Image: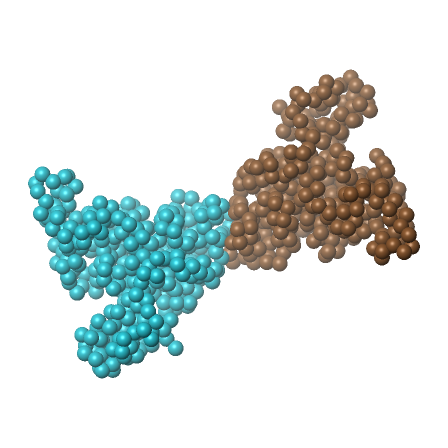
Chain colours: A cyan, B brown
Amino acid sequence: MTTPESLATAALMRAVDVGDRRMGELVQRHGPVETLALITGSAEAAPDRLRAWKARLAESDPEEDLEAGAQMGARLVIPGTPEWPTQLDDLGPSRPLGLWVHGSADLRHSCLRSAAIVGARAATPYGAHVAAEFGVALSEEGWTTVSGGAYGIDGAAHRGALADTSPTIAVLACGVDIAYPGGHQELFTAIREQGAIVSECPPGVHPTRARFLIRNRLIAALSRGTLVVEAALRSGALNTAGHALTLRRHVAALPGPVTSEMSAGCHRLLREGKAVCVTRAEELIELVGFMGDDLAAVERGPVVARDELDEVTRRVLDAVPARGGSGPASIAVAAGVELTSALSCLGRLAAAGFVDRVPRGWRLRRATRG
Amino acid sequence: MTTPESLATAALMRAVDVGDRRMGELVQRHGPVETLALITGSAEAAPDRLRAWKARLAESDPEEDLEAGAQMGARLVIPGTPEWPTQLDDLGPSRPLGLWVHGSADLRHSCLRSAAIVGARAATPYGAHVAAEFGVALSEEGWTTVSGGAYGIDGAAHRGALADTSPTIAVLACGVDIAYPGGHQELFTAIREQGAIVSECPPGVHPTRARFLIRNRLIAALSRGTLVVEAALRSGALNTAGHALTLRRHVAALPGPVTSEMSAGCHRLLREGKAVCVTRAEELIELVGFMGDDLAAVERGPVVARDELDEVTRRVLDAVPARGGSGPASIAVAAGVELTSALSCLGRLAAAGFVDRVPRGWRLRRATRG
């Protein structure tokens, strides 16, 4: 659904590179629409930065971006809308302007109970095996696995999560249409069906080393904690762990043989007391699930008890199936409400964590079933 | 050298089982000679405990114990003598009454710079490999490896230490003449030549499960810190780590694959924040060597600078070779002092950490060479 805010955000996302703190500050102070007007209305004598933004805006085509996204099935999620993961506000001025989301899962709700599993691309069979086991176990327990979609540990964690029914979120350092790396196209298709591909890069943007490092803050910020499964001493996974520490998220490290360089980064985190030693998924869940007040977003969020829902919303909720999925029209009929009313109820229910968007429509979240 | 104190201690060591806190308190308050007199002079109506001790004393033959020890080459080291490791005083009433020492190394000095390496008997090839590497590296750096002489991790650590020139100390749960386990006789012979076999059990006493657990406190107390290399969740090595924690010694754990049960105990120590993650010997040395005030014994001990030695002692020190070894007679001649004077100087020099007893006599400690 195109709004003035989403259109302005799509434009601003073309004006700057990802993680631009000055733009972030402006948008957080004035909102995207006013910020856009400020830039486009700036005088010829404006500071270089404004003029550069203005020049890039002149070449942008936000309507086309939104339409291209819609055609591939992706949506632009922006602050202030129900699907926005408010824990990203912890990033301050480096909060992304918006996120392109391509997949069936509700991003905000998926990340309420989520853990990031990250690690080396050049993973050992040991690391890949354990990462997959953690993904499976998190998924079985209704936890979302967040990772970066890369080869090695990331891919193993996503695949493990897909073996059960919980969502998995891949945060990319390129447009959701680029979906790098190429060898993971089938994996990304499966992630879209059961989770989501997420990026702050507009469509068509290719990954760079800088974008990978900036992307890492999103993996750390979206999840309640980050587990580093394997990391050499200069691994990007340690960068993600560093972001998690800065954001006061939980950080865990998986030990491995001291004879393996791929575990050296994990052991350093443990030695320096920056990470908790975690050997099983239960331990990770205990860590990230223990302190309910760890992520401010959990408290700030609109999560409400079922019996606090209003009459119409509850009827809509009762009409959502536990398995498979139903379209909004069928749900409206079953609930005996108007389609527009059903749609707005479903949006609120998704934000509150009761239902999920799935390929076949909507269905109940695991935690609210049975 | 038999003294009234050593004779009384040898007797008292026959009167109680190892680790008897009531006996320990008595001896620490009254000394061994007076304690022995108290017990042997106690009336028929004395408490059961005293009568039981008295009965066992009646069957003991301390002269024979001391002579049997001397014949095999072992000595009884007791509190208050130069070779006594005063850090054992941290054990309070469970401080051993005395220690049988069989080997060339000066026990007190060897343990001033020592680390315990302990772990499972059922070690994996990974654990045994790493334990041996730590033993080698400690030995190369002039650190003494303390362990329990068992199969698995203990044996690998001792063997590693023997690959270089520093002492290694095996603390047994049986008489030094029993030298359990039987398959380690050759290893024990090598340890005696370059280090020492140590036990608080009198000659002829066989190991029991209880004696192993009580023995563990000595491994922890003698060394500046304990590294657990591999340990299942119910391993005796965790008992040693527990003693080290109680004694406020450093505790380190070596990580391993989370898929290995033999590393589960190490990972639990790390998870619970009871141990520091250590992956290389340098890290272990950094840990145990960092805080000079960690072992009170280091401060209390008679360690003095070379130029604080008196004239005669310095001449004796100058006559001690850096390699090989010289007998006291040759040293006395080279230093131009009487043999008895040389002997007492050598005793003081050993206690102060300047020289070591070796199979061929005496030689300089590594740290004082060059």
**Relative to A352, is B203 above or below?**
above
Q: Is residue A71 left or right of residue B323?
A: left
Q: Position of residue A130 (x, y in %)?
A: 45, 58
- Number of numbered labels in the structure image: 0
Which of the pair B117/A336 is nearer the observer? A336
Q: Is residue A175 left or right of residue B36?
A: left
Q: Residue at x 88, y 51 (%)?
A: B54
Q: Residue at x 74, y 35 (%)?
A: B83
Q: Position of residue A108 (x, y in %)?
A: 30, 62
The picture quadrant where one finds residue B326 is: top right
Which of the pair A257/B232 is nearer the observer? B232
The picture quadrant where one finds residue B281 is: top right
Whether residue A245 appears in this view of the structure is yes
Q: Residue at x 58, y 46 (%)?
A: B251
Q: Is residue A76 left or right of residue B318?
A: left
**Relative to A307, is A98 above or below?**
above
**Relative to A51, is A296 above or below?**
below
Task: Identify the image quadrant of the N terminus of chain B.
Answer: top right
Q: Position of residue B307 (x, y in %)?
A: 66, 20
Task: Identify the image quadrant of the C terminus of chain B.
Answer: top right
The picture quadrant where one finds residue B330 is: top right
**Relative to B326, is A154 above or below?**
below
Q: Position of residue A105 (x, y in %)?
A: 29, 66
Which of the pair B42/B235 is nearer the observer? B42
Q: Residue at x 75, y 19 (%)?
A: B312
Whether residue B104 appears in this view of the structure is no
